[in-house]
Image (cartoon, grey):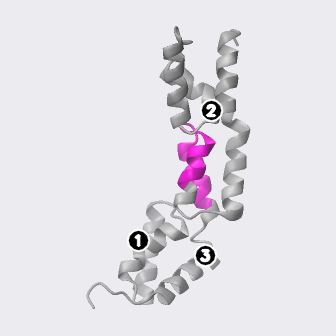
Amino acid sequence: MAGVLSSASLRVKAIAALTRREHSRQELEKKLAPLAESAPQLDSVLAQLQREGLLSDERYAESIVRTRGARFGGARIKFELQQKGVDGRALAQAVDALRDSESERLQQVWQKKFGAPPASATERARQQRFLTQRGFSSEAIGRLFRGLEDGF
């Protein structure tokens, strides 16, 4: 079969991908599956990388939080991590880290995008939709707009 790699070659491909950026196990599995001889072979290679600390869902989640946290809310990042196969403790830690700073990050995103309180109900709804699509919680958005009405 063309394109099928030995375990050693598969490991080299996995390490090459991990040197470019962090990957979740599921993401790396999908990327390497067409190159593997069998699912057990791929599972064995990925399990070995995890034991060696080269593949880590926790590190992947931290990386996503670090790079995307300034622009997106907790709900959006949580969804993205779930789509990439991150669950359990790694997901819980990432969500907790985001929860603590959500109001601050929300205010920074709002300030950068809008910078001024909405002049009308239509504008307020538009701003709230934008922030909701970014994954910020409705509670945090409500607090932000109540603060705007009160002049912070």
Name the spot of residue 15 as percent of width and height, x first. 47, 73
**In the rendered structure, which disc, 3 or 2, sits on the residue that comes first in sequence?**
3
Above/below status of 98 relative to 143: below
**In the rendered structure, which disc, 1 or 3, sits on the residue that comes first in sequence?**
1
Residue at label 3? 50
Magenta stretch: includes residue 106: no
Residue that appears at 64% across and 32% down: 138
Quadrant location, the C terminus: top right
Task: Write the start and end of the magenta stretch as one range.
Answer: 59-80
Neighbourhood count class around disc 1 (C-alpha, 10 Å): few under 14, some 14–19, many 20 upward: some
Above/below status of 37 relative to 113: below
Indicate the amino acid at tag 3: Gln
Residue at label 2? 105
Indicate the amino acid at tag 2: Arg
Instruction: Decide which of 87, 104 is in the foreground and name it.
Output: 87
**Label for residue 31?**
1
